[in-house]
Each structure stands twice: as C-alpha cells, then as structure tokens.
Amino acid sequence: MIEVKSLTRLYGEVIAVDHISFKAASGEIVGLLGPNGAGKTTTMRMLTGFLPPTSGSAKIGKYDIVEDSMEARRRVGYLPERVPLYQDMTVFGYILFWAQLRQVKAPRDRTVDVLKRFDLLGRRDKLVRQLSKGLRQRLGLAQALVHDPPVIILDEPTIGIDPQQVIEVRQAVRDLRKSHTVLFSTHILSEAEEICDRVVIIDKGRIVAQGTPDALEKQVRANSFTLEVGRLAPERVLEVLRAIPGVASVKRRDAHFSVETDGSRDVRGDISGAIVAAGGELLEMKQVKSSLEDVFLRAVQSAADNPQGQKKS
Amino acid sequence: MTVTWTIFRREFASFFVTPTAYIIAAGFMLFTGVFFSQEFQVAAVRRIPINPATIPSLVSYMLVFFAPLFTMRLFAEEKREGTVELLLTAPVSEASIVVAKFMAAWAYVTILLGITLVYQAILATYAPQDIGHTILAYIGIWLYSGTVISIGMMFSALTENQIVSAFSSLLTLLILYVGDGVGGIIGNIQLSEIMRSLSLEAHYSTSFAAGLFRAEDAAFYAGVIVIMLFLTMRILESNRWR
C-alpha cells in the first residue's frame, strides 16, 4: 500500500532523509522508530505530499506522491505531530469542514459516525479551544479518518498525553489494522513493540534495521546470557568461557557473568559442558530478555560506527 | 470549485466567531459616522450638495489602516497553528486555498461597504442624488478594497507572525497610498507620473470618485489583485521547498 524507494530529502546541505526504502502492505501497522531528529517527520511529510522529495520516489497504492499527488493525497489521512486545529470552530464544525473538503459523500452522517467512534459526539458543540489535550488528539485522529482513507499516517500520536489516553490512542491505532494501512512514528520503543506488525528503525535519515519486532529482538536475544557459576574461582570461569569458540566477550558482575556471543552458533551446550569439565557447577544460565531497546541501541550504535554515506557533497 | 466554496465558508465564518470582525466593523462605523455627520452638518448649514463619493473616499484612506487588521491572520494564523500542513496535504490546489481566502476577506469588506450605504440613503432623503456617480464611486472603492486585501494577504503568507504581517502590509499600503501626493511635489515630471500611476489612490480619486469610469483604472486594480494572488500561491508553494 505504501512503497518507498530510495527516498531522499535535503534541507539545503543537510540530509534529513537519506535513501530510505521500505514497504507497508495493506492492513499492516508499520512503526517508524527513531530518536528525535532522525527524519521521521520529514519522511511522513513527503508521503503526505507536504514536502516534495529531493530524489527517490514513493507510492500510495498505485499513485506516485509527486506525479499523481492529488490522487495520492486523497488516499491518505494524516495527523501531524502538533495536531493542527482551528481553535475557533466547534468540534462538529471542524470535522464537517474536513469531510466536505475531502468531498466525502453524506458529510454530516459521516461526521457523526467519526465523532461517535472517538466518543466526541457528546461534545459536538464545544469549541476546539476548550478541549483538553487528549481530546484534541482524538479530534485529530477523527480528522485523519473522516474520509476513510486506505492509508493513515500518524506522527507521534501518543506524545504529550496522559497514560490513560496513550492506551486509548494505541487501542484506536490497533483497531485500524484490518481495514487500513497505518504508518506511525514514535520514539517510544515499547509502543512500537506493542502495536506494530513491522518496525523500521531510522537514525540520522537512514534505515538501520527493519523487520517484525520479534525478529529484531531475536537478533539480539540469542546472543547474550547471564550465568551464575559455583565452586570455581571467577578468574578460572572467565578463562574457561573465553576459550569457547563463538563467545565474543565475557564480563564479570559480582557473582554473575554476562556472556555475549558472535551469533554464529548456539554455545549454550558448550558453556555448560566446559564449566562442568573444569570442575564447577552451573547454577543458572539465563537468556537475557532483550527488547527493541537493545535492537535500537545496537542499530543506532553500529550506524554511528560506520558512517559511510553520511556525508554527500 | 466545491472545495474552494468549502474553504471560503470556513474562512468567512471565522471572521464572525471571534469579536474581531465586530470590533473592526464598530471602529469602521464610528470613523465614517463622525466624519459623515460633520460633512452633513456643514453642507446643511451652507446649503451645498454633498459629493456622493465623500464616504467612499474616506474609506479608501481608512482601509490602509483597517485592511491589515483582518488580512493579517489569513495565512499567518494557519502557519502558526500548523493547520496549513493539513490544508496542503488535502487534495486541494494552492489556487483554491488562496482564492477562497481572498474572497472571504473581500466579502467581509463588501459587508462593511454595504453598511456605509446607510449614509447614501440618508443623503437621498434630503436631496435627489446622482445615482450614477454613487454607483461608480462604490464600484471603485470595491475594486480598491480588493486590491488592498490582496496585498495584505500576500504579506500574511510571508510570515507566521500576525504583527509582522499587519505592519508590513500597513507600511506598503501607506507608501502606495501617499505615492500620489509625493509624486505631486517632485520636480521630475516623468518620475512623478510613474509614481502617480503606481499609487493606489490616484486610480480612485481622479476617476471613480469623480463619477468617471476609466478602463485603465479598473485594469490597474484587477491587475494588482491577480499579481498578488499569484505571488501568494507561489509563496505558499515555496514553503514546501524550504
């Protein structure tokens, strides 16, 4: 539904988005994950037609965002990070305005439907300026959905609202899964983990990793353990562990040892065997439960270590 | 077209949901009312006729100061609130947005001008009026007001600060307004003729206000409006490229 090919955007000399490519299938929720200033908003602004790309292309459905901008825009619902609202309109008037502007059939009925869905119908005659932040967020979501677009782009929809409302917004996003393609950005890892089918991690304008949250975690999870070893001097344990092929590093933390492997093979059997053979006993071996956070930090870290393609003249 | 109409309606309604439109209208009526009463009194005492263009001519001066007050927010507010991002990502052309906003502001001024017809009605109850002269004076001031608004709107698109928007358009309008007078005190006749031709006021005071219709004056106002609308569209587009 969304197809991004080598999309690039420069602000003057600064590269905001650097040749990124990804796809989002129909009915999929894709999370765009990255630290602040990674290029998430710029990417979304290009997909919504607000900013033209410097190079590369992207398609919404079968419509190119530059060549068929109007058709592409018709198929996108967008909630920018700042939740832009006309302060002096009523809740109903605001949604009706977008319904009419988007040329929805039976705009009044549709407005009522959408307001009902976000539980705003009771406040239909309130002025937008009187709404609390969480309600504004919901109003923004209603605006993005009023024309029932196949693609919905949400820029950090859970920022700056209270935890209860965060849960509501996340639930609302999850509810969109079946009928819409959702691209949403966040810098909160647990959020991406919780609701996304797929995660695209970007940093400094480049994609550093992408895949399902599970697959990304597995990359890291299989590779680190903590051990507790008895009846053996710590120095001896370090020595034994370091001798095992495939072990990248071993660190001692009080009574525990943390082992990192290079991921080339499963070393768990070797570890227990070697410890026992050396006369010790393995009291505990625990696979470190990593999260997207680790994936993220690693991805960002390794991108910083290999800064090729970072500067372009 | 329906899209332009939708934006027009929202924009026009937005004048009236805040006190702005009413306060500006009140100020407008106060100024014109006081001025009219004085003129009327003098004319009544001396038993001389009143020029039907008296009020429209006053309005041409007042608009220099009043127009920036309601054009300043046209785009500046949308930019500050970020709503311009939603407008520009909706399937709507820049032309629709610009034309709709311009028309909304012009419609508001048209209402203000309509209210001043009260004065003409008062005059008509005392003495027969030159209807042709009155109509032309109003057609002229209507075109003039459109021109003033288009200039104000262009400055509104340049900034997200309403004060900057208001003052830059006020300064520009003032310069364009006094161009005629300044041209008159310059020795160089060619230069003064150029200044006169570019001045907003000269195209009104010497033709429409005198009950004359000259195509060149109407074309001047229409031309400035078209150029300003075009520039506003370009400015709006240029935001995308920065």
Image (cartoon, grey):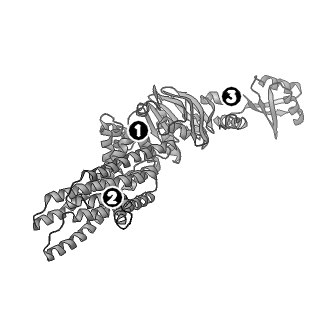
Q: Nearer the viewer, residue B166 or A213?
A: B166
Give the Cα distance between marks 1 and 2: 36 Å
The numbered mark 1 sits on a residue in which chain? B
Q: Nearer the viewer, residue B185 or A13?
A: B185
Q: Is residue B117 left or right of residue A230?
A: left
Q: Quadrant of the N terminus of chain B?
A: top left
Q: Which residue is mark 3?
A: A219
Q: Is residue A37 visible?
A: yes
**Of tags 1 and 3, which is closer to the observer?**
1
Q: How many marks?
A: 3
Q: Which residue is mark 1?
A: B90
Q: Nearer the viewer, residue A182 or B24?
A: B24
Give the Cα distance between marks 1 and 3: 40 Å
Q: Is residue A287 left or right of residue B53?
A: right
Query: Which class describes the residues within 10 Å of circle 2: few (<14), some (14-19), or many (20+)?
Result: many
Dot 1 and dot 2 within a common chain: yes
- Of the residues under marks 1 and 2, which one precedes in the sequence? 1
Q: Residue at x 51, y 26 (%)?
A: A25
Instruction: Report if the CB atoms under discs 2 and 3 are less than 8 Å apart.
Output: no
> Mark 2 is on which residue type?
Leu
